[in-house]
Every structure is written in structure tokens, then in C-alpha cells.
């Protein structure tokens, strides 16, 4: 039975509660999931309990936006427990940075003449884990744009007028902190990095030496060709090919838990490979 290792809930910018995400995974016939809300582990306890009752395998996780060669990289971190630890402790500063950035974006929109308030965004997000998709959803509800994608394309995406940067860890730092916390860092949806065909090995050499454990090869929005290409690459590099749908509920229409756009299938061996990766000896001893 397949798995899905990239899922967002209401604890960040998804529209399904952690329990609903688990329910959808069970309905999809999955054997295991990872919950990977942005920058927080707030849904882990509830999701793990629901998964336990349903006999579904569960990996605690999060997704970070990290700095990499001047751009942004998303990093999934698996087996990160909601308890004090080196990475967990740094995440509170990252969350504070997210909050101040959200206020800056709303102020920028107001300056552009858009009628929007922080309270509306907070209500849309049900108070926690606020991110740009919530701001986008408010803009849709108010008729400023037709859909969430248009809100990003016109206003919120990197480089658009209401975009504001936020505090983020550097890739190397995040990898070190993740490993020091007993967790496995994995590069999410690597196509967003704009690395040319054949350039991955060189691009990721240093990150792999530092402890990068995998690349998200089976991604809901990728063609089958790209998925197999990336899985082969992971094999060559000696790291894990992970995968998931990047489900966000209504904020990313037409993406389902487990099946992505309909043709996603992440093999369940992925979980065993991630467990092995977590238990590998300290990197210097490899
Ligand atoms: P934030 O955490 O506030 O930076 O928002 C990140 C989320 O916004 C991602 O998980 C995506 O779901 C969404 N997102 C980011 N960039 C875009 C884009 N260009 N188009 C559509 N959605 C985007
Ligand atoms: Zn998101
Ligand atoms: Fe992402
Ligand atoms: Fe994601």
C-alpha cells in the first residue's frame, strides 16, 4: 500500500484538520503518512493519535523554507518530535519571523489600496500557522482576485508587490540542526530550485556530506518521467527518494491525499529507507 509523506493541515496552511488528513489517508488506502505543516509541530500529537487508532503508520515532520545560494529551498524534516531539541528550539524564532512578515504583507496590501485587515486573515487561518495562502483566500473571498493562484501571481509570489521576505534558516544550518535533533532532512519539490538537468549531483554534494537524507522524487505535481528520473538520481547519490502530494485541502485545488493529481504512488519502502537513514551512524563515520 502506498504512503504520502507531504501533507498540510489546519495547523499551517491546509484546510483539513490533522484528524481529517488521517481520515483521508485511510480512505485512500495508504499504509503510512507524514504530517509536514510549515515551521511547526502543532498537529503531530493529534495526527499520531488518530493514525494509531486507524492502524496507519505515522512519521512526525515539518516543512521549512531555507536559504540556499541566494534563493529559497523547501526542506522536509522527518522524525522531528514535538519536544525540546536543537531544531525545535530554533523554530520559535522562525515562527515569530513568519508572524511579523504576515503583518508586513497585510500592510503592503493596504498601501496598494486593497481593503484587507489582519483580523480577516487570522479568522481565515483559525488563528494559527498563518501563511500566504490564508491571505490569498481572503483576497478571493473579497473579490480582489478570482482564485488563489491569481493572488500569488499578481501580489504575493516572490518579487510581486506585496511579497515580503521572512526569517529563515540556511540550508546547511537546517540540516545540521535536524540531524542533531535525530531527524532526517529532505529537499522538497526540487524543481523549484531551477537546477539544470544533470546539475543535481554537484548542487547537492555539500548538502549530502552535511547530512541531507533524501530528495522528494515522487511529487504530486511531477510527470512520471521526472519522478523516475529523480528516484534514479537518489539511488545514484545514496540518499532516499521520498514523495508526497503536498495536499493543502481547498488551498491547492485538484490535489488529493495519497494520489496527488490522480497518478501519484509513493512506494511504502520509502518509510523503511527513511528509518534506515535516521539510524545511520554519525556522518563523519560513513
Ligand atoms: P508561506 O509559508 O506564507 O511563505 O506560504 C507558502 C505556501 O504558499 C506554499 O506552501 C504554497 O502552498 C504557497 N505558494 C507559494 N508560492 C506560490 C506560488 N507562486 N503560487 C501558488 N502558491 C504558492
Ligand atoms: Zn503550504
Ligand atoms: Fe513546499
Ligand atoms: Fe508543502
Image (spheres, rainbow, N blue to C red):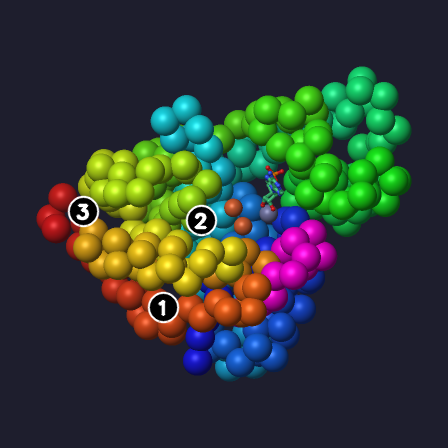
Q: Is residue 12 left or right of residue 174?
A: right
The boundaries of the magenta stretch are 248-258
> Residue 54 location, x and y as percent?
56, 81
- Mark 2 surroundings: few (<14), some (14-19) or many (≥20) residues within 10 A: many
Q: Which residue is mark 2?
A: 189
Q: Which residue is mark 1?
A: 271
Residue at image position (67%, 36%) is 152
Residue at image position (38%, 73%) is 268
The image quadrant that residue 71 belongs to is top left
> Residue 70 location, x and y as percent?
41, 24
The image quadrant that residue 169 belongs to is top left
- As drawn, which residue projects farthest toward the top? 111
Q: Secondary structure at mark 3?
A: helix
Mark 2 within 8 Å of ligand 3, using the beta carbon: yes
Q: Is residue 273 left or right of residue 118?
A: left
| Mark toward the start of the polypeptide (3 vs 2) | 2
> Residue 224 location, x and y as percent?
41, 62
Q: Label 3, label 2: how many angstroms apart (C-alpha)?
A: 24 Å
Q: Label 3, label 1: how many angstroms apart (C-alpha)?
A: 20 Å
- Mark 1 surroundings: few (<14), some (14-19) or many (≥20) residues within 10 A: many
Type of secondary structure dominating the magenta stretch: loop
Amino acid at each position: 500500500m502506498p504512503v504520502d509523506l507531504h501533507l498540510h493541515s489546519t495547523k499551517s496552511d491546509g484546510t483539513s484538520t490533522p484528524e481529517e488528513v488521517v481520515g483521508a489517508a485511510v480512505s485512500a488506502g495508504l499504509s503510512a503518512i507524514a504530517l509536514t505543516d510549515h515551521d511547526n509541530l502543532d498537529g503531530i500529537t493529534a495526527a499520531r493519535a488518530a493514525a494509531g487508532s486507524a492502524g496507519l503508520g505515522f512519521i512526525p515532520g515539518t516543512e521549512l523554507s531555507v536559504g540556499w545560494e541566494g534563493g529559497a529551498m523547501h526542506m522536509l524534516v522527518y522524525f522531528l518530535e514535538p519536544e525540546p531539541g536543537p531544531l525545535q528550539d530554533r523554530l520559535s524564532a522562525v515562527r515569530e519571523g513568519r508572524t511579523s512578515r504576515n503583518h508586513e504583507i497585510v500592510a503592503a496590501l493596504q498601501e496598494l489600496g486593497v481593503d484587507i485587515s489582519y483580523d480577516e486573515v487570522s479568522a481565515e487561518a483559525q488563528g494559527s500557522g498563518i501563511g500566504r495562502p490564508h491571505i490569498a483566500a481572503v483576497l478571493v473571498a473579497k473579490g480582489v482576485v478570482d482564485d488563489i493562484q491569481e493572488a500569488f501571481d499578481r501580489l504575493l509570489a516572490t518579487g510581486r508587490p506585496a511579497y515580503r521576505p521572512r526569517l529563515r534558516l540556511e540550508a546547511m544550518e537546517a540540516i545540521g540542526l535536524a540531524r542533531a535533533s535525530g531527524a532526517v532532512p529532505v529537499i522538497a519539490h526540487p524543481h523549484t530550485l531551477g537546477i539544470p538537468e544533470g546539475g543535481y549531483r554537484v548542487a547537492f554534494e555539500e548538502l549530502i556530506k552535511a547530512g541531507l537524507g533524501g530528495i522528494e522524487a515522487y511529487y504530486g505535481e511531477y510527470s512520471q518521467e521526472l519522478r523516475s528520473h529523480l528516484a534514479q538520481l537518489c539511488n545514484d547519490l545514496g540518499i532516499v527518494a521520498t514523495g508526497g502530494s503536498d495536499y493543502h485541502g481547498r488551498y491547492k485545488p485538484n490535489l488529493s491525499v495519497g494520489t496527488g493529481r490522480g497518478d501519484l504512488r509513493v512506494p511504502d519502502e520509502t518509510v523503511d529507507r527513511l528509518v534506515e537513514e535516521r539510524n545511520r551512524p554519525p556522518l563523519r563515520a560513513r
